[in-house]
Amino acid sequence: MKTVFIFGLGYVGVPLAHALADLGWQIRGTTRAPSKLAAKADLGWQIMPFESGQPLADPQTAFADVDAIISTITAIGGSDPVLDAHGDDLAHFTGWSGYVSATSVYPDMPDAVCYEDTPVAPATQRGKARVIAEARWQRAFGTEIFRAAGIYGPARSPFDALRDGSARIIEREGQVFNRIHVDDICRIIIAAMTTPRPARIINLADHKPAPQGDVVRHAAALIGVDPPLPQKLEDANLSPMAQSFYVSRRRVGSKVIKPELGLDLLYPDYETGLAAILAAGG
């Protein structure tokens, strides 16, 4: 039986772990708050505390006989907390590895499409940090890089914000981006693990880039509520990090998901993804 170690058992890491467990993988992984995942121990998962500045207590045991490593933990301040803490401990690791990055590594391309072979040229500090982290993972292990667009799914969709009154529509001329449902992320990562190619880059993005307001309005119509009034970006009083999200004018596609992995997305656009969330009671 193979063992996977997932750094970051969060919104992507937990469903990915469930999917891998269903395929017979043993699960080890980290979270900042192990008590929140205490019930997973009943499934045989081994869960350890980890965060920036708090390395694993016993890395030798944690990484013993691990066949695959996946990190969903974001780069912080231009540095990767996993490699900072445990790069030396993993120096002799020879199994498969994957790093979940972001499409923020690409430049603004409002009139073209960013594919896996598009040169990186991030416009934000977050994107620049991702580029550095990607390069470190690839140099160390030939890691496969998964560049995710806006991640959504159950409990992380416009429905939640519309219902609690926190939904906003922020308008900026030309702003557009892709999304990706968490179920499709898991399927693509597992397909890559099944047919690995060292240092491969895979864009995790749907087929319908759209302004943020279009998605919020569509979600509001589905549940029969009024969408919020739009605000201009300069009037929205957002933090610098939040503002950086609305800077992007980027369309993303993949030359790998269908041609190389043979996968069709379950949710190729936000309409199908939101409909599925709603049908499941989300």
Image (cartoon, grey):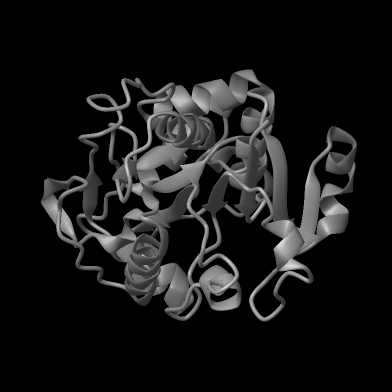
Please indicate whether residue 87 sits to the left or right of residue 101 in the image. Answer: right
Name the residue nearer the viewer: 146 or 160: 146
Query: Residue 144: image x %, image y %?
Result: 37, 49
Question: Quadrant where the C terminus lies?
Answer: top right
* Horizontal side, residue 237 vs residue 111: left or right: right
User: Above or below — where is 76 with respect to 178?
Assistant: below
Question: Is 245 placed left or right of 174 in the picture?
Answer: right
Residue 64 spot, x, y in % from top left: 69, 54
User: How many numbered marks are there?
Assistant: 0
Which residue: 39% across, 53% down? 143
Query: Based on the displayed image, in which of its 4 quarters is residue 120 positioned?
Result: bottom left
Q: Residue at the location (36% across, 55% down)?
A: 142
The residue shown at (20%, 55%) is 174
Q: Could you say which is closer to the camera, residue 248 or residue 44?
A: 44
| Relative depth, front residue between 132 and 180 | 132
Q: Is residue 277 visible?
A: yes
Residue 60 placed where, x, y %?
71, 64
Q: Report if residue 281 is visible in the image.
A: no
Q: Is residue 92 above or below residue 96?
A: below
State left or right for residue 16 relative to residue 101: right
Q: Nearer the viewer, residue 142 or 102?
A: 142
Where residue 29 appears, as percent x and y from the top left, is 70, 52
The quadrant the N terminus occupies is top right
